[in-house]
Amino acid sequence: MKESYRQTDENELIKASINGDKFAFSEIMDRYRKLVARTVKGMLGDSVFAEDIGQEVFIKLYHSLPEFRGEAKLSTYIQKIAINLTLNEIKRRKRFFSMFSQKGNSEMYEFEVADVDNQEKREATDIVNRALMSLDPKFRIIVSMRMLQGYSTKETAEILNLPLGTVLSRLSRAQEQLKEIIGKL
Amino acid sequence: MKSEEVKNLIIKSLDADSSPQEMAGKLENAGVSYDFSRGFGDKVIEKLFSASLSVNREVEFVRSMSYVFNRIALTGIAAIIILMISIFLMEGSFSLNSILGLGNNYDESIICMLTGK
């Protein structure tokens, strides 16, 4: 049943999902799960928490599909949900850790590079994870969107609702930080 | 690809003159990949559709409760109306005593009954 949706147009999938077709929604998930994984895991690290947030992203997407007007691409819409939920999680955890622990931000992430099929890939992903996790969250999101998703500076500014100058300056400062961090990795 | 090359790619990917898509592609080719664990989709579907199933059950329960309430309320209103009519026919008024079923000399009878005099 699910296979019959492989070639289906995205708008049809959305309509079917709104009508409660779980196979159609499952196909939407298959198409965008890597996009969400890059966003969420790029910001939270490769942890069980990221898996939970990933699930929340798709649950929220399912419930908000009736409101999706198709003015933006579905990928952009999903991306925004993923970014908002991830930023909320970072804020929540920051509050929690500032209340109950003296540990720094870098210690609140778990690294479980799972499901990466070989050692070389595992190492490459691990280096990127460690580099990203060492950055301040406001730099991390911009770097992750450019580095992992391939968004241009203009697209990043649009998605995050930030002035272009802010994105450019954050990228430049993040690059400076990354040069120092990567030297130590 | 060696880790040094991955590190260089990370730095280069943030250069203003680099193409973000090309650099993201190079990093992916270098093995930088993100995905959720196996069974991720099934978990989401289970959460979504078992949740809607329980919502349906709740809606069904509320509907049957409201049906039962309507039946009880209508019967109750009919009983009250019949009672009021019968009180009016028997007592000829809607005074508190007639509604409570008390006679005019009720106070004295109670005193007699309690004191035995």
Image: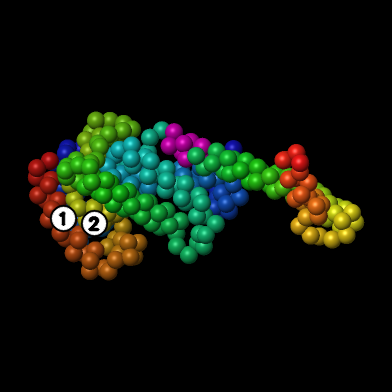
A105 or A156, which is in the foreground? A105
Task: Find residue A124 and report its image quarter.
Answer: top left
Q: Quadrant of the N terminus of chain A?
A: top right
Q: Are marks 1 and 2 on the same chain?
A: yes
Disc 1 residue type?
A: Gln
Quick one: label 1 or label 2, which is nearer the N terminus? Answer: 2
Reading the image, the residue beneath label 1 is: A175
B58 is higher (above) or lower (below) than A158: above
Q: Position of residue A24 (x, y in %)?
A: 55, 45
Residue at image position (25%, 49%) is: A94
Residue at image position (80%, 52%) is: B105
Q: Is residue B11 visible?
A: yes
Residue at image position (50%, 39%) is: B47
Q: Position of residue B14 (x, y in %)?
A: 20, 56
B37 or B106, which is in the foreground? B106
* Bounds of the magenta segment: B39-46
* Prevailing SS of the magenta stretch: helix
Asked if residue B87 lies left or right of residue A75, the reply is: right
The residue tagged with tag 2: helix, strand or loop? helix
